[in-house]
Image (tube, grey):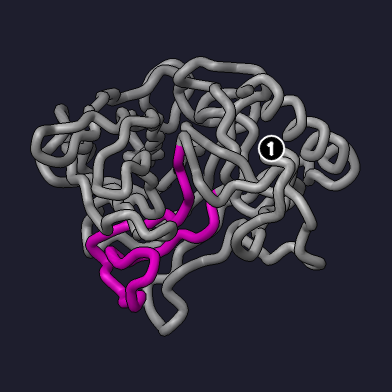
Amino acid sequence: MLKAIDTRFLALALGAAAVCTPAFAQWVTLSDTGTTILSTLNPKTNVSPQPATCTNTGMAPTETVQTQSPTLGTGKFTGLPGSTAMPGFVSTPFRSATAALTIGSPVVTVGTLYDRVYCTGTTACDGTNTYVFATRAILNTNPWDPTHSSFEINDYFRVVPTTATGIQAGYYMGQAGDTTIDNGQAFKYLEYAGRTQKGLGQTITRDQGYVAFREDTNANDPDHCEPYSFNSARSAWTYAKLTCPGGVSTSPQAFKVKVREGGEELQTIATITVSGFVCN
């Protein structure tokens, strides 16, 4: 089943991308002041007209079908820091850690979060204290709440210094057919990024102490309707680029990264908090 999903997605995405994908990605600079808090990268849009059937079920969709553009290049990179897609960074992470995503009683493991930091330089950090904090989740289909749904992440939050300005955001989807942690393909694009700790269904208010990324991650998404939307057990790698005058913590610090289930399909609204690297 997964192989069929990947093939259909590729046919749709690559056919259009050959014509429209820009040659170089551009960082998106997040606002530090003002009422516009979230920057738009690749938002969901309603499919019009509404499809008569979803190819994965052969049945009519039960709710409004939404999709994202496979050719929109805002903030989208085609590789990890240090690759040809993002030169100027050391390709080996400066810091790297993993954390289990667990919730409930009894405890259910719903996935794993990967937290990395890359520095500017060639073979070693160049001393400018410029870093990319890269985060990716990989989820499973374990039921965890009374709806017996798999856990869905709608929002990612990372603690950053309130004094940091000009933070830049981007993302990397991975590569078709790859199943590795580094380059496995995601099927949901990054929708928004900004300085807040509010997520889906909440009133977005500015909070300079966080960087937020809005993106669906779900290994068994009940509202996916192919070929317009797909399950995505992997998130994209989300990138936050900023200067850390005091460097980066040598180990992950408690309660610095959060993922939030926003109840998009009536699941229980919940937040999982894990350790993450800190910009000093």
**Rendered location of residue 266, percent (x, y):** 37, 60
Q: Quadrant of the N terminus?
A: top right
Residue 192 among those drawn in magenta: yes
Question: Is 182 left, or right, of 57 in this rendering?
Answer: left
Identified at 13% across, 33% down, the residue is 107
Question: Is 274 left, or right, of 125 in this rendering?
Answer: left
* Residue in front for this viewpoint, 153 or 39: 153
Residue farthest to the bottom, as pictured: 35
In this rendering, the answer to whether 123 lies above or below 240 is: above
Residue 37 among those drawn in magenta: no
In this rendering, the answer to whether 32 lies above or below 29 is: below
What stretch of residues is rendered in magenta?
190-218
Residue 43 visible: no
* Residue in front for this viewpoint, 78 or 141: 141
Classify residue 269 by image quadrant. Answer: bottom left
Amino acid type, callout 1: Asn
In this rendering, the answer to whether 188 lies above or below 47 is: above
* Residue in front for this viewpoint, 64 or 212: 64
- Give the main secondary structure, helix, strand or loop, of the magenta stretch: loop
Classify residue 17 by image quadrant. Answer: top right
**Rendered location of residue 208, percent (x, y):** 27, 67
Residue matched to label 1: 56
- Judged from the image, the secondary structure of the residue bearing numbered disc 1 is loop
Residue 248 visible: yes
Badge 1 local density, few (<14 within 10 Å), some, or many (20+)? some
**Rendered location of residue 123, percent (x, y):** 44, 16
Question: Is 279 left, or right, of 240 in this rendering?
Answer: left
**Rendered location of residue 217, percent (x, y):** 45, 42
Identified at 38% across, 28% down, the residue is 140
Identified at 23% across, 29% down, the residue is 109
Identified at 38% across, 47% down, the residue is 153
